[in-house]
Amino acid sequence: MVEQRRDGRDERGVRGGAQGVPEAWGRAVHADEAEAWESLVATARRTVSDGLVVGTSGNVSVRVGDTVLVTPSGVPYDRLTPDDVTGVDLDGRQVLGTLIPTSELPMHLAVYRTTDALAVVHTHAVHATAVSTLVPELPAIHYMTSALGGPVRVAPYAAYGTEELAENMLRALTDRSGCLLQNHGTVTHGATLDQAYDRTAQLEWMCRLWLTASSVPGLSPTLLTGEQLAEVGEKLRGYGQRG
Ligand SMILES: C[C@H](O)[C@@H](O)[C@@H](O)C(=O)COP(=O)(O)O
């Protein structure tokens, strides 16, 4: 018999041991999940390298079928390896890995349960977080507001990791693919990790733009009307390459 060590590897160094996958690991990682995990880790690392979070702030998830892969709580992204795959089902039960999933699981699961999103990105981006302390909604300073479904709302404050925060976030996300969390940060979702990430980057950029324009003494920025946003919303449907 091949013995398991405390780190979960057998004496050959194989994770999962001789019998395949032990109870603690839930089940084996499928090939599409391994691939999605690689993209998730790359996206999480991007949030750090692009300055959208510091330390272990923020979290990322991606849905593969009925499994949600999530960043583990409090682990620096540069330490994550393919062996660290962390996954839960839509009820939050851990089905993959032994690391504790992100403390913001309620927010991620709330998005997957109520939308057709396949990826969620949460950050503490500095300009977005600053705006979340100033206004209940990001003023329509740029037409890329339409890329998020309309003016971006601020979800009222609740402590991190709580169901209350997830509920506040869901309300702020109604008909939107992104929102701000008061005194906390951002949440965006999308059909892919790249799309969810890009929405976070656009949101942070618009917050920076509004803070810059509104900080000029004696002047206040012009804002776009609902009609102007709706026009761009339509136009953006055909944006980019076809096919
Ligand atoms: C305390 C955490 O930073 C919390 O603010 C959470 O929102 C966060 O961004 C990171 O938590 P996890 O490491 O648990 O994903």
Image (cartoon, rainbow, N blue to C red):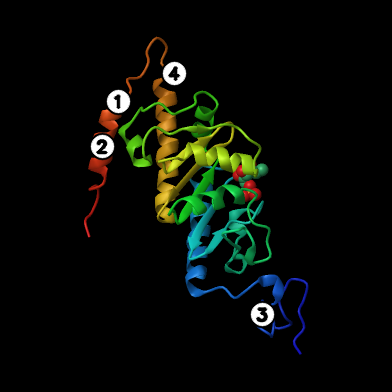
Mark closest to the chain's N terminus, 4 or 1:
4
Residue displayed at 61% across by 51% down: 105
Q: Find disc 4 in the rendering and name its residue.
A: 215
Amino acid under disc 1: Thr
| Visible residue check, residue 57 | no
Q: Mark 2 vs mark 4: give the one in front.
A: 2
Which label is found at residue 232? 2
The quarter of the displayed image where residue 152 is located: top left
SS class, disc 3: loop
Q: Find disc 3 in the rendering and name its residue.
A: 14
Mark closest to the chain's N terminus, 3 or 1:
3
Q: Position of residue 43 (x, y in %)?
A: 48, 54
Which label is found at residue 196? none
Callouts 3 and 2 close, C-beta under 8 Å: no
- The reply, left or right, for residue 218 in relation to residue 76 is left
Callouts 1 and 2 close, C-beta under 8 Å: no
Mark closest to the chain's N terminus, 3 or 4:
3
Residue displayed at 53% across by 40% down: 169
Q: Position of residue 41 (x, y in %)?
A: 53, 58
The quarter of the displayed image where residue 98 is located: bottom right
User: Residues under labels 4 and 1: Cα distance?
Assistant: 21 Å
- The reply, left or right, for residue 101 in relation to residue 4 is left
The quarter of the displayed image where residue 163 is located: top right
